[in-house]
Image: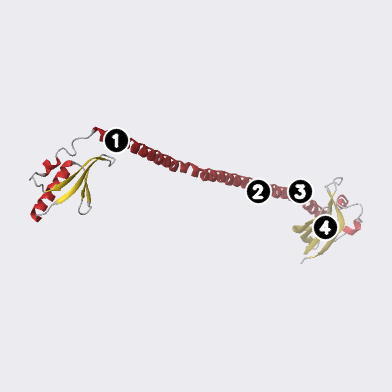
Amino acid sequence: MFRITRLSTGQQRDFQNREELEFFLEGEENRCLQLNTTATFQLFHLDKNEEPLESMELTIPSSGEQDVKELLGDFGLKKDKKSIYSRGTKQEKTQRKKKKKHELSTANENMSKSKPSVKATPKSSNHFWVMIALLLSIFSLAISLTNHYSRYQKEENKTQQTTINQGADVFCRYFISNYFANSSAREDFISNSLDLKQFDTDKATTVSVLLEKEVMTKKVTTLTYVINCRYDDNSTANKRLTLTVKQNKEAKYGYLVSKAPKLTAYP
């Protein structure tokens, strides 16, 4: 590499090889000949680290009518051993500096590359929270299914209780036919604490028996029926009959009427 400085102005210019330097100086020489003037330059031959290998001062055009190539002579072609040795020492220092810079640059690059791995922690944390959310969802689903099963069991139990309670309805329907017939079999349906005379009524045949209302308590069940009756004179009437029954394991039909019946017209 070559560097040239115009001494009159201090202007500098670099050239990659000697041929470019010669071409520039020949152009300057022609310009000076046309203007009838001279120009003086300081020439430097530099190594790759821009350390000077040699230098010279050059004035063009030459008073001895020598061309540029002759003026340059061996400049830029020959290297002085001392300068090579001194340059080598400086070059080694420069290389060591560059090596340190390269190592620092490499270390910085490695540090910058390693940063994403540090940022991986939030991702791991995200995975953790996703797993927690999934477990909570499964837990909520399990609770929901358990509650649903519990409601189903309660409804099933209610159904079973209703089925058991239908025994009171069947008992009452069976009793009603004997009640309107004034049958002696009424004794099998009535509690011993009641007087049979309280169950006397006009003899009739039941045409239809409809359950209007049923009220259950822990001890007794009260049932109200709407009954269509046909009497011996073929006349018909609608009656409302309310019966209170109590479950009794020793009774013939499992229930007993525990209160005198209430018979009224309907509606």
Badge 1 or badge 2: first in the primary sequence:
1
Report which residue position mark 1 lands on. Answer: 86
The residue to which callout 2 is attached is 148
Residue 243 bears which disc, if any? Answer: 4
Nearer-N-terminus badge (3/4) = 3
- Element carrying mark 4: strand
Q: CA distance from mark 2 to mark 3?
A: 24 Å
Distance (Cα) linking label 1 and label 4: 131 Å
State which mark lies toward you, 1 or 4.
1
**CA neighbours of label 2 inside 10 A, class few (<14), some (14 to 19), many (20+):** few
Give neighbour class at mark 1: few <14, some 14-19, many 20+ (Cα, 10 Å).
Answer: few
Residue 246, how many percent across, how many down? Answer: 84, 52
Q: Closer to the N terminus: mark 3 or mark 1?
A: 1
Q: Quadrant of the N terminus?
A: top left
Q: CA distance from mark 3 to mark 4?
A: 18 Å
Q: Secondary structure at mark 2?
A: helix
Q: In front here: 267 or 204?
A: 267
> Could you tell me residue 110's position as x and y percent?
43, 40
The spot of residue 97 in percent (x, y) is 37, 39
Please tell me which residue is depicted at 76% across the width and 59% down the height of the picture. 213
Answer yes or no: is residue 128 visible.
yes
Rounded to the nearest angstrom, the CA distance separating label 3 from label 1 is 117 Å
Residue designated by label 3: 164
Residue pushed farthest front? 63
Q: In the image, 199: left or right of 10?
A: right
- Label whose residue precedes the other's in the sequence (1 or 4): 1
The quarter of the picture where residue 87 lies is top left
Horizontal side, residue 91 vs residue 58: left or right: right
